[in-house]
Amino acid sequence: MFCPNAADWGNVADWVAGIGTFVAVAVALYIAGSERRSAERQRQIRANEDYERRAQVIAEGIRLAGEVEALAGNYVQLVTLGGGSSQANRADLLDDLDGIRRQLESLQKFPISDPRLFAEIGRAAYDCRVETGLIDKSTSYAELIMKRVAERLRQRRDSLVMLCA
């Protein structure tokens, strides 16, 4: 029972409509915040995936540059110890270097957004090229070429390591 002198509190329908409106506004704000948090989480996941992809490309580039450096260094050591003069040894070396160069070139085509990384991998692929006619001239000349290749690929490997930071 309402007192006739009291303020009019309205009827039940007005109260239900008011509470429903308040709940609807609260739910809309919650959904908007939830979508914002979800979008931010998705951006963070994409950024992490890009970082992981970049790190994998760098690691593979470092591994391949180290492999070329090791192959060239092993050939230099073999020549220094009196071996490596056979045509078969040089042909195997050239085949191995060509295979790694092709791997570097395909790694360069991997979708990455860092132009410095793209350039370093391209330089490493270029630096491990050896002309067949040049290495076949003499064993000592082949040794000099392989020393140069090993040194250049060490520099490329160091440059790739610096890109990790």
Image: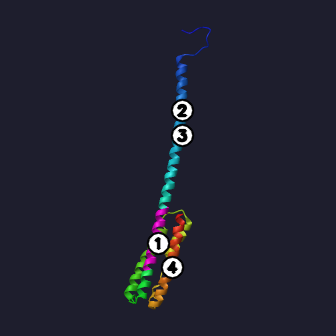
Where does the image place residue 34, in percent across and percent down from the top left?
51, 41
So how many labels did they put on this image?
A: 4
Between 34 and 62, the residue placed more toward the observer is 62
Where does the image place residue 86, in percent across and percent down from the top left?
38, 89
Q: Tell whether label 3 touches label 4 (CB within 8 Å).
A: no
Q: Is residue 69 magenta?
A: yes
Where does the image place residue 111, in percent across and percent down from the top left?
49, 63
**Circle 4 SS class:** helix
The alpha-carbon separation of the residues under discs 1 and 2 comes to 56 Å
The alpha-carbon separation of the residues under discs 2 and 4 comes to 66 Å
**First in sequence: mark 2 vs mark 4:** 2
Which mark identifies residue 26?
Answer: 2
**First in sequence: mark 2 vs mark 3:** 2
Residue under label 4, please give it: 151
Give, as a three-letter code, the residue at label 2.
Ala
The alpha-carbon separation of the residues under discs 3 and 1 comes to 45 Å
Q: Residues within 10 Å of mark 3 (few under 14, many from 20)?
A: few
Residue under label 3, please give it: 33
Where does the image place residue 147, in percent across and percent down from the top left?
49, 83
**Circle 2 SS class:** helix
Residue at (45% x, 68% y) in the render: 60
Give, as a three-letter code, the residue at label 3.
Gly
Give, as a three-letter code, the residue at label 1.
Leu
**Circle 1 SS class:** helix
**First in sequence: mark 1 vs mark 4:** 1
Residue bounds of the magenta highlight: 54-71
Between 88 and 76, the residue placed more toward the observer is 76
Q: Residues within 10 Å of mark 1 (few under 14, many from 20)?
A: many
**On screen, residue 35 above or below 27:** below
The alpha-carbon separation of the residues under discs 1 and 4 comes to 17 Å
Residue under label 1, please give it: 104
